[in-house]
Image (cartoon, grey):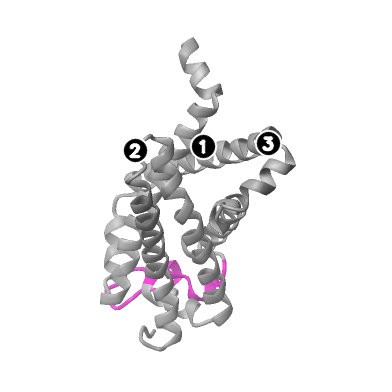
Amino acid sequence: MTVSGVRFWQSSAGRKILASITGLLMILFVVLHLIGNSTIYFHWLNAYSAHLHALPAFVWAYRVFMLVVLSVHVFFGIQLKLENIEAKPLAYVCKRNLSATFASRNMIWTGTIIAIYLVYHLLHFTVQVINPEFSAIQHADALGRPDVYEMVVRNFQNFSISLVYIFAMTALALHLTHGIQSLFQTLGLNTEKAMPIIIKAGAITAIILSLGYISIPLLVLAGVLKG
């Protein structure tokens, strides 16, 4: 690595840029994952899952890539947060909080909730060691495919599981609300006139994505999606 490369990693601006780029990649993942999940509305979830897992090399390469992206984002996010706490005196922090939003003040906590839930979610629906009686790998649909649709519906019929999912997606909405705005600022894509639009668009995008995910357990609990 060159000297300039080392300085980039060590500088606050460089770390913010890396956190922003990895954040953007994860936003794209959230969008793509929601599109895939939305196939449940049309009872295409089993077909989507079967086609996806017919490409194991691609799936594992994508998982490893996203793990690296997530690790970099978390590492620099925590590092920048600690630097901000150390650099600003208490009085300044208190004054700044008067104009800061709830989402911006709690990025570290919403990020922690999302990270914890991600581990749980992977154990639940990917590794399938939580509630194994409903696991897709042990139950096939009429076409002999892993019954992912049935696994999702049966689990979300449990109110506690749905509630945890909804809570995590609410944390995601809060995290994205400030994260999208911060991304534009860090990458220098904002202007004084554009910033109010960016803030509103970021909040709307975060809400739409969150509601897209939350709609699945809600429709299961309402009996619209049935096993």
Task: Look at mark 2 in the image and give the residue it sits on.
Answer: 189
Q: Is residue 32 magenta?
A: no
Q: Disc 3, disc 1: CB below 8 Å?
A: no
Query: Badge 2 local density, few (<14 within 10 Å), some, or many (20+)?
Result: few
Q: How many marks?
A: 3
Numbered mark located on residue 88 in the image:
3
- Assign a secondary structure to mark 3: loop
Residue 183 image offset from top left, x and y in percent = 42, 42
The residue positioned 68% from the left and 36% from the top of the image is 88
Q: Which residues are magenta?
A: 130-148
Q: Look at 67% across and 44% down and name the residue there.
A: 93
Q: Earlier in the sequence, mark 1 or mark 2?
A: 1
- The quarter holding residue 101 reads bottom right
Position of residue 227 measured from the top left corner of the image (x, y, whole percent):
39, 84
**Gap between marks 2 and 3, in whole Å?**
26 Å
Disc 1 marks which residue?
Answer: 72
Pick whichever, 97 or 128, lies toward us.
97
Kind of residue indicated by mark 1: Val
